[in-house]
Amino acid sequence: MWKPIIAAVLSLTGHTPGPDATGTDAQLWQDCGDGLQCAQVAVPVDWARPSGGKITLGLAKLPARDPATRRDSLVVNLGGPGEQIAWLPHVKTQLGELTQWFDVVTFDPRGFGRSNPVTCPTPSPQEAEYVFATKERFDRYVQANHEFGTSCTAAAGALAGTLNSWQVARDMDAVRSAIGEPRLNYYGNSYGTMFAQAYAEFFPHRVGRMYLDSVIDHTTPSTRDWLTPRAETDERNLRLFAEWCATDPKCALHGRDVLKVWDEVIALAPIPTASGGSVSATRIVARSFVAYRSQWPGLAESLKQARAGDATRFTVDVGARDPDLSRIMFCADFPYPADYRAVKALEARMREVAPRIGWRQVWPMANHCAGLPSTKTFPQHPVHARIPALVVNGDYDAVTPPADGRRVAAQLKGSRYLQVPARHAVYLTGNPCVRGHVHKYLTTGELPPEGTSCPEH
């Protein structure tokens, strides 16, 4: 993994630094490999006590191609929550067009990467089978997650209780000041849009242009209302998978009623495996990936074999683990019911709108949050600000469904929602129509007309 060399001692404007209006100190940009420049900025450990101890945030930037045509800086956060600097060299191509106009700047959120990183000594007990069928199994998991959270809180030291977006929004304003920008121009993707909502709430007068991609909605206090569009989108993706099988001869279930096969497989579970074990219905539900077309052929083959009596393919774990610290910040921003009966009650409500697969959306947050020690939280609440942001959520994205983007756009008055049949991280996946609107907005401030949509890429 790329390791940036974080920099030395003068301000970005070239003179000896002192605390600026936000109480921070900026350090000189220096080359740190891979075409990047790196720097540091000091911020309070706890913005509620700004005169207390300090931590250091690591910054990195892709410089604008031509200083003569450079407009200003664009701060980017691609999600997580997690480190950003280590991934910047890997997304230089996707972000390269932006350097026609901007220095593309990123920073690791507090506790991650190059920003006073916290290493949790006990690994999170994250499981592939995150849907819990019994209270006994859930209770064992809650205890393991509590032990993880307790050890992680101890390792965080002075940062304990400050890993939330209330603090990060203030860090962002310190970064804005340190890089010499009067207003924050920002591109947030996925969890990066959570930080954007907090910044818009606390610093609306300092927002420049704000592009929000794959928005996660922090404005809805109702857990049920927050879960429903996720469940509905997941269910819709299963139907799209079935429609694909009906039209593509390459599908292993082509010519069969795919939804009927699904129902039969779930009814047959537990289903034996080649190793002599078995796979439960909850495991099948948890490991059926319907969000992306690239995953559909493998799912069709897995269902075909499971229906024939061999569920071995569902024993394979795929996908990356979430960084351990991510769940600490996520659960501080999105408090979630931890009692098994309460989560099962939510599941029952979601089964009414998404009876085959979408109801599983109840469980990822329980997997993250149940059992974590109580901490200072920054829970969901309405946000009303006049921020003419450009907002894009993919129609097929169950993680950040289109309802999230529309709800946030409605609360950021003057914003515009751009509809597109896509999945997660629309700009990064290269949709040319979306990119055209984003570039025009970021460089001119012009939003697309109301009701504009883009075709699938």
Image (tube, grey):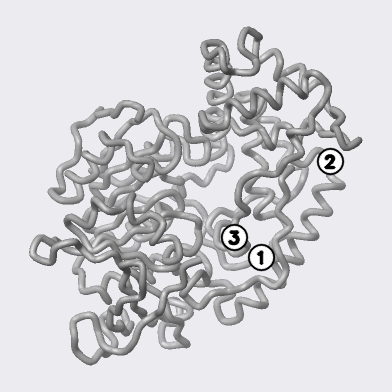
Residue 410 visible to the viewer: no
Separation of marks 3 and 2 at Cα, in angstroms: 26 Å
- Residue at left 36%, top 53%? 188
Image coordinates of residue 249 in percent, x first then y, are 56, 12
The answer to which of 387 and 155 lies nearer the viewer is: 155
Task: Bin the neighbour count of mark 3 within 10 Å (Cα to Cα): few under 14, some 14-19, many 20 and up.
Answer: some
Q: Earlier in the sequence, mark 2 or mark 1?
A: 2
Question: For this rendering, which residue is in front, 241 or 403?
Answer: 241
Residue 99, above or below 414? below
Which residue position is annotated with label 1? 374
Question: Which residue type carries mark 2?
Answer: Thr
Q: Which residue: 25% across, 84% down?
A: 11
The mark found on residue 275 in the picture is: none
Check if mark 2's residue and mark 1's residue have beta carbons within 8 Å.
no
Q: What's the distance in space between the residues labelled 2 and 1, CA to CA?
A: 24 Å
Q: Quadrant of the C terminus?
A: top left
Mark 3 / mark 1, whichever is N-terminal: 3
Question: Which of label 3 and label 2 is nearer to you?
Answer: 3
Residue 343 figure quarter: top right
* Residue wearing tag 2: 134
Secondary structure found at label 2: loop
> How many other residues sit within 10 Å of disc 1, few (<14), some (14-19) or many (≥20)?
few
Rendered position, 114 above or below 91: below
Does residue 434 show up?
Answer: yes
User: Element under label 1?
Assistant: loop
Q: Tag 3: residue type?
A: Pro
> Which badge, 3 or 2, is on the more N-terminal residue?
2
Check disc 1 and give the amino acid type.
Ser
Q: Nearer the viewer, residue 361 or 250?
A: 250
